[in-house]
Image (cartoon, helix red, strand yellow):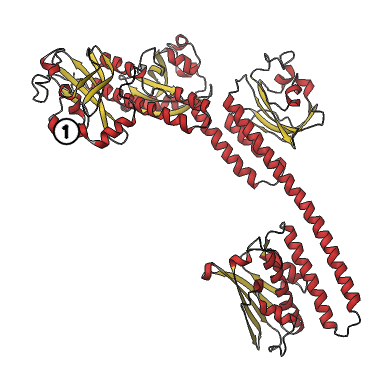
Amino acid sequence: MDHIAPVDTPPVSDTPLVSDPDRLATLRGYAILDTGPEPGFDDAVQLATLICEAPVALVSLVSHDRQWFKARIDFPMGETDLDASVCVHALSVPDLLIIDDLTQDPRTASNPLVTGPPGIRFYAGAPLRTPDGVVLGTLCVIDREPRPGGLTPNQASALRSLARQVMGQLELRRAMVAQDALLAARRQAETELKASEAYWRGLFHRFSEGFVVGEVLRDAAGRVTDWRYIDVNAAFGALVGLDPASVMGRTVRQVFPGIEDDWVDDFAEVVETGEGRTFTRQIGAIRRWYEGRAFRLGPERFAVLFFETTARVGAEARSTALLALGDRLRDLVTIPAMTRAASAIVGETLDVARVGFGRLSADLAVIDVEPDWTVAGVASLTGRHRFDDYGRLRPKLERGEPLAIADVRTDPHTRDDPSPLLSLGIGSMVNVPIRERGRVVAMFFVHDLHPRAWSAEEMAFLANVADRVEVGVARLQAEDQQRILNDELSHRLKNTLAMVQAIATQTLKGIPQRDAVDAFIQRLAALGRAHEVLLQQDWATAPMRAVVERTLDLHTVLGRFAIAGPDLSLGPKAVLSLTLLLHELATNAIKYGALSRDAGGVGLTWAVAPEGGGTLVMSWQERGGPPVTAPTRRGLGSRLIGMGLAGTGESALDYRVDGLRAEFRAPLAMLNDPSSGAD
């Protein structure tokens, strides 16, 4: 049998890593020195002695002045000085350190553990290397007799794997402390940490990780199509919910009918290539997630170490779902759309059969279920239902409390007659009340086909979903109420402006200058259109294009204007200024300019120039009209035009023979300030 040859290493004096400050700081960061025994590390050394056929195994951590043993088998001391350390030579070795005869190696010949008790002769150590490449110590095996052949390749590979397992144990141990502080849900964190307590602990039945030895089965063409359980440990049964004895000799497809092909294909690849494989995967039939590593044991056999990550995967899925739900609810504008979105997200996240939402009658006796979410083959419950037809479901609802039923056949609320629920495909269920102004008005429900124990984390998730739906519904109702108020304000403002126009008309009817009177009345109408646009936007900001189109539509057909520009948001003051400016320009164009002729038209464009942090530049260009000249006197209309956008006065008028050309500028920040009301 092939063996792994010894590896040369520098003498102690040439290993500055012993006292390297960064390495020592990293070691301190794991807070492992002088701690008590832990099963994961004890299991690792026990397994190392069995695999390498050596009486002694140590988990050794090298500090600045000593080497301390976290776990040890058949070794009398808990720590030694560095002068008695062999592991110190492994700090700078890229792989295994193997010394087949310690008495013959100049680095160790004078070591007191070699020259005196316990008289060690053979050493093989695998570095405990952090993900950043820092070596903290070794997992080593020791013999009291020389071994000229060192380790077999399988033994060396197993020792490396066990060292990685010990390092993983150190990483997980350190992560547990950090997770306790970071996770808001302490209970969830504790569950996940327990599930992850030891990444690779070994192959014995007392391990908390599951351990499987399997043998692949091939078809006539030699292709692996299944594998048989050869051996499993007790933890396997706890992790998959089966009696370990019940799976022995059976195939994985027999134990888990319909299991995903990856559970066969990946392990087949491990056997055929000899390369280990790490996996994170679900067994869909039992709805559990697992993480682990598979490695080859022989020509047709493999082994798997794994632990359950259902809690962690579920927590991540629920967190992602809540973020997605928040994003969806912000964009939706109807309550049915919100409830459908929430139902779909909950159904896919919890992997259930049906999720829905329903409005409740005032006495909470009846629920009107809106279109619900279901998996394929499960009927919808859309329509009206009476709670009393399905058991004692109302008391908790009346108290505003959620109701979780793991099994409708045994739960006190439904066990008297579960048949109505079972006929609808409800084996387990959750009802979550939704409030409106402190009163229960609706219900969010989740159904599964089979009995299911609803975890506290799942209930907290559903409560969070209900809270978000409540907030979303309240937002829509508030927006509906605001729209009603705006409509009412708009109606009253129109009536007020109409009254002002009527009063002005009656008051000024005797004035002979009818042009001035008509201009005044038209300006009032333009102001009315501007206020109408602002009210549609809650008097905050209004889209520029809507303001332009509403104003110009008062004067002539919009088709006579070529309008182009980004749809910017304008503050109230800018809206009113722009409205009066466009009104005067359009009035003059109809009277004297391009719009006074059938063939005439106006190009109205605007863009944002970069200067000054952003400047709006608006251009008015008439074409196809009579020749125009500058006015000989400045009336109110001319002054309004000269004030430009938002009263800044930045306007340039060019009265050309082919039509008026005007350009107006104003800082963009001044125009889109929603806090600036009309002066």
Which quadrant would residue 33 be assigned to in this image? top left
- As drawn, 214 above or below 509: above
- Give the labeled residue for mark 1: 15
Residue 175 placed where, x, y %?
A: 40, 30
Seen at 49% across and 29% down, the residue is 312
Farthest top residue?
245
Residue 562 placed where, x, y %?
A: 67, 73
Please name the amino acid that badge 1 sits on.
Thr
Work out which quarter of the rendered image holds the N terminus and state it: top left
Seen at 77% across and 74% down, the residue is 556
- Is any part of residue 345 visible from this angle? yes
Q: Which of 36 and 663 is in front in this view?
A: 36
Count all numbered tags in the image, as a single digit: 1
Left or right of 511: which side holds 95? left
Residue 192 placed where, x, y %?
A: 47, 26
Residue 172 placed where, x, y %?
A: 39, 27
The local secondary structure at tag 1 comes to loop
Which quadrant would residue 136 be assigned to in this image? top left
Query: Few, some or many C-alpha atoms within 10 Å of disc 1 (few <14, some 14-19, many ≥20)?
Result: some
Which quadrant would residue 664 be assigned to in this image? bottom right
- As drawn, 517 above or below 270: below
Work out which quarter of the rendered image holds the C terminus and state it: bottom right
- Is any part of residue 597 visible from this angle? no
Q: Which of 202 and 534 is in front in this view?
A: 534
Q: Nearer the viewer, residue 607 or 257?
A: 607
